[in-house]
Structures are given as C-alpha cells and as structure tokens.
Amino acid sequence: MFCIIEIYEYIYKKTIMLESLFNLIKEQGADVVINNPEIPNEQNNAVLASATHSVVEEFQGVLAGGGLQNIMSLFGGGGNNAATGGGIGSLVNNPIVGNIIRSFTNKLTNQHGIAPSQAGSIAQSLIPGVISSLIGKTNNPDDSSFDINSIIGSLTGGSGVNAGGGGFDLQGLLKNFSGGTLDANGDGQVGLEDIMSKVTAGAQQQQAQNSAGGGLMDMIKGFMG
C-alpha cells in the first residue's frame, strides 16, 4: 500500500511526465498541427492533447497486456526504430508505433472532424518523430526531461519502479536492449522476471482508474492553457 507521501509523489511525477510529453508533441507538431490550414486554430491544443493521449494510452495498454519487454525493446533500440539507424520512417514498422498512429488517426477523424486521408497523413507525419525524439531523450544521459523509470512508473502507479532506494532500475536495464539484443550478458535471461508482474498489474489498475473517472485525458487537457 502506498502511504500518502508516496501517492502525492506519484501524482506529481505522473503530471510532470504527461506535461513534458504534451510539450514535446507541441514542439514536434509546430508544422504538422499548429501551422496546418486543415486544422482550425481553435482545435490546435485539442489535437495535440489527442496525440498525447494516443501515445500514453498505447504505452499503458502494452504494459497492461504484459508487454514490458516490447516497451523496453522500443526504447532500447530493438524495436526497428530510429535508434538502430533505420531513420524515423522505420518506426512506422514497429507495432506499438503503428497502433499509436491508428489511434491518433481515429481521434482526428471521429473527434476533430478531419477527413480520413488528411488525418492519416497528419498522424504519419507527427507520431514517428515524437517517438523518435522521446527515445533519444530517454537514452541521452545529458537530457533529464525523460527517463524510462518515470515513464513506466507514471503509467503503472509506481509499481516498484525506482532508480534507487529498493525499486527496479529500468533505466539501467535499457542497456540490455540496445542493438536489438534482449540478453546482453548471454546468461539466457533479460532481467525482467521480477518486474513483469508488478508492472502489468500496476498498468491494469491504472487503466481501471482511468475508465472509472476522467483519467488521463482530463490531466492532459489541463496543459492546454
């Protein structure tokens, strides 16, 4: 059970992560969204919020389905992403990124009234660049805006993910996924067995809480200003 201090700390870290992601998407979407004549100016922030929600919703869904390894592989360079040298375009071939693109496309069409062909083009132009930037920042020791511990922890209610003090250090584990290998030291294990069940259960619990209340989207809308 979390104590009150831990709960407030988790909420604070989750808010910071979501706001940082929203701002990253806003930066990446300057041309694709903000300066796009197909999107009315009054909808710019709402569209950026939908993109943010699509990213977070997919990551949390993957974790809730037991896909921590898939997330770690994506961020560590093993998911056919830009970190492997394939360029931003190769990210479209990653199932996680593909699902985010489809989710955002549907939101653009169904919630923002964008024509399907135009919506698909916007999503294809924005999402791979966002994920590539997010991966780069997460793996850059000189950039403190994102780290894998905070990203996973914010989507799972903490779930023991912590860079120190008794938690799981996922940031340190990322090196096991660099270059596409899941077993960097050749011992036949990838170091996730003790983490998987906690992360999965935590993500499932957060999904249930999001469904019961306003959840993620309400928090994201708070950054629209």
Image: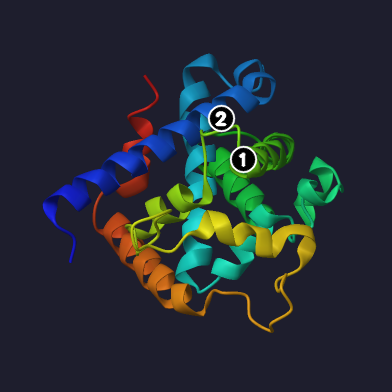
Most foreground residue, 179 or 121: 179
Q: Amino acid at mark 1?
A: Leu
Report the residue that reaches farthest toward the right.
Answer: 86
| Residue 196 x/y as whole percent | 47, 74
Q: Earlier in the sequence, mark 1 or mark 2?
A: 2
Q: Position of residue 69 (x, y in %)?
A: 60, 69
Q: Which residue is mark 1?
A: 134
Please tell me whether mark 2 sits on a helix, a strand or a loop: helix
Residue that numbered label 2 is attached to? 24
* Residue 85 shown left or right of residue 99 in the figure: right
Residue at the (58%, 44%) spot, across then down:
104
* Colour pattern: rainbow
Image side of residue 178 versus residue 70, left or right: right
Q: Marks 2 and 1: in contact by CB < 8 Å?
A: yes
Task: Decide if residue 86 is on the left or right side of residue 196.
Answer: right
Compared with residue 156, is residue 104 higher up or lower down, i.e. above or below?
above
Which residue occupies 71% across, 74% down?
183
Quadrant of the image occupied by residue 205 = bottom left
Q: Is residue 191 visible?
A: yes
Question: Which image quarter: residue 35?
Answer: top right
Where, quadrant-wise, is the C terminus in this rendering? top left
Identify the element where label 1 is drawn. Answer: helix
Seen in the picture, residue 161 relative to 183 is either above or below; the reply is: above
